[in-house]
Amino acid sequence: MLRYIARRFLSVIPTVLIIVVVGFIIMELPPGDYLTYYITELQARGYDGAHEEAEMLKQRYALDRPSYIRFFNWIWHFVQGDFGESFAYNKPVKELIGERLLLTLILSLSSLFVSWVIALPIGVYSASHQYSLGDHLFTFIAFLGVGVPGFMLALVLLVAGTRWFGTVPTGLFSSRFENAPWSWARVMDLIKHLWIPTLIVAVTETAGLIRTMRGNLLDVLRMPYIQTARAKGVKEDRVLWKYGVRTAIHPLVMSLGMSLPGLVSRSAITGIVLNLPIMGPMYLQAVRQQDIYLGGTFLILVTLLLVVGNLLADIALGIIDPRVRYD
């Protein structure tokens, strides 16, 4: 098992290096830069010294130097935890994304946990009670969950909360805890506000897992070794959970690598609608303003989540099925 983990870990290293290079190239691809956006904004306000201020910023952030020099300078500081300066906010990127990254991971992991807790037993029930009333009901709900985007549910929630309850359930904190330092009271306030966005973000993931689990388990339950186990008198619950679910869950475990970045990307528009202090809304704003270091850091961190997620999924799959550990 240790050799298998070591092989998977070593395969991650070149992937990370490629991600860093591609991430910087993507940062540099859009025509123009933040300074062009900034000059246009200043000129729209009637500011006469826009070009002079832009030249000062260009020298300050070394935007007048070749791309390869900026890349090596950026990567050298990146591995040391210095992600560069945000042009729009005039602050270090590390300060801007620290709490947002933490809250994004909390929201994503909470949504992932809720999705699995709900989807796994429902998928098993639907497959073991095929064409029953409950199976038809859960299949219909799963199709609705896949088809309805999370931001639409967020908009419905805002309208319903305003009209029926006189309140708008937005944000992850109460007003007095939004900018407060971390404390036990702030953690409890976060937990109190977390369940609404968690359920909204988890809807699509839950629906997809239900359909995947149902389809996989139906295929597994028709395999010869399942029929052999039943013919030998093995109890149906044991056949279902030990032999059926353990094999049918493989694709779900493999999809874990895509789940975290998928939840982060799906929560972006939901975060805008519900005014959530997570990565998605700030990343979209950075892309609009061509704030390359802020947007590029978000892009690389989300991609690293994909790599780490795939690594953990491979390890989990190797634990579940020993055959995976052998070449």
Image (tube, helix red, strand yellow):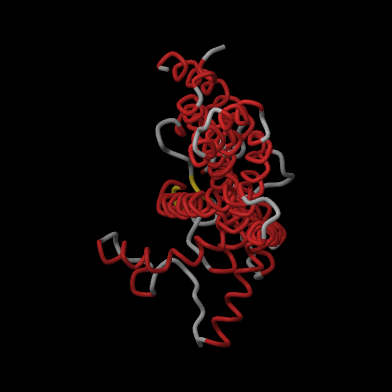
Dividing the image into 4 quarters, which one contains the N terminus?
A: top left
Q: Residue at (42%, 68%) from the top-left corner?
A: 193
Q: Residue furthest left?
A: 184
Dividing the image into 4 quarters, which one contains the C terminus?
A: top right
Who is closer to the viewer here, 153 or 54?
A: 153
Q: Would you place residue 128 above or below residue 152 in this image? A: above
Q: Percent x, y for residue 321?
A: 51, 25
Q: Percent x, y for residue 299?
A: 58, 42
Who is closer to the viewer here, 20 or 271?
A: 271
Q: Percent x, y for residue 133?
A: 67, 62
Q: Would you place residue 149 above or below residue 304 in this image? A: below
- Residue 149, quarter of the rendered image: bottom right
User: Is residue 155 left or right of 183 when viewed as pictured?
Assistant: right
Who is closer to the viewer here, 250 or 257?
A: 250
> Total label count?
0
Whether residue 157 appears in this view of the structure is yes
Q: Residue furthest right?
A: 31
Q: Would you place residue 22 above or below residue 99 in this image? A: above
Q: Would you place residue 258 above or below residue 68 in this image? A: below
Who is closer to the viewer here, 54 or 235?
A: 235
